[in-house]
Image (cartoon, rainbow, N blue to C red):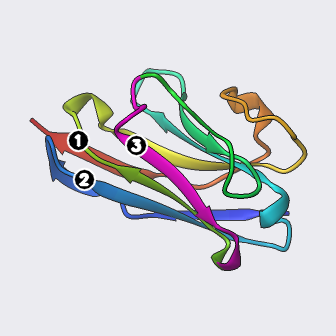
Amino acid sequence: QVQLVESGGGLVQAGGSLRLSCTASGRTFNRALMGWFRQTPGKEREFVAAISRNTGPTLYADSVRGRFTISRDNAKNTVYLQMNSLKAEDTAVYYCAADGGGSVLTRYASAYDYWGQGTQVTVSS
């Protein structure tokens, strides 16, 4: 069982930066593929980024590649999402997710077993 708690959301002006954190409980964090998703009202949850078990391969949505960076610190059971050059269209609730059984990075939400409660990111234009 993995429990995920996100933090770091808030209000920022366009062009600014935020860093989201997601801390996991449980002993299986370092075996889980981790991902970030986001969702706006009336829309499906959208993939943002994912990272492998070690600080190795990563995967990004085209809309954030070059602006967002996903990383993890297994010693702290934490995964991060550094968001730079934020745009108004990045406004959403951001969710952290864990894929405990997978071996290949994926952008499909159905592959992830555990989810955090979400943190709001609002970018003002």
- The x and y percentages for residue 124 are 13, 41
Mark before the other along the chain sequence, 2 or 3:
2
Tell me the distance, in whole angstroms, between the alpha carbons under discs 3 and 1. 8 Å
The amino acid type, in three-letter code, at marker 3 is: Phe
Which element is circle 3 on? strand
Per the rendering, the mark at residue 68 is: 3
Above or below, 11 against 111 in this view is below
Rendered residue at 22%/34% (across/down): 87
Residue 36 part of the magenta segment: no
Look at the image and tell me in which quarter the N terminus lies.
Answer: bottom right
Per the rendering, the mark at residue 85 is: 1
Q: Which residue is mark 2?
A: 17
Count neighbours of disc 3 (C-alpha within 10 A) and say few if under 14, some if 14 to 19, many if 20 or more. Answer: many
Look at the image and tell me in which quarter the C terminus lies.
Answer: top left
The amino acid type, in three-letter code, at marker 2 is: Ser
Rendered residue at 23%/41% (across/down): 85
Which element is circle 1 on? loop
Q: Which residues are magenta?
A: 63-75
Tell me the distance, in whole angstroms, between the alpha carbons under discs 2 and 3. 9 Å
Which element is circle 2 on? loop
In the rendered image, which quarter is residue 102 located in? top right
The amino acid type, in three-letter code, at marker 1 is: Ser
Count neighbours of disc 1 (C-alpha within 10 A) and say few if under 14, some if 14 to 19, many if 20 or more. Answer: some
Rendered residue at 27%/57% (across/down): 10
Q: Is residue 9 visible?
A: no
Above or below, 14 against 16 in this view is above
Tell me the distance, in whole angstroms, between the alpha carbons under discs 1 and 2. 6 Å
Left or right: residue 85 compared with residue 45 = left
Disc 1 + disc 2, Cβ < 8 Å = yes
Q: Residue furthest right?
A: 101
Q: Residue furthest bottom?
A: 75
Mark before the other along the chain sequence, 3 or 1:
3
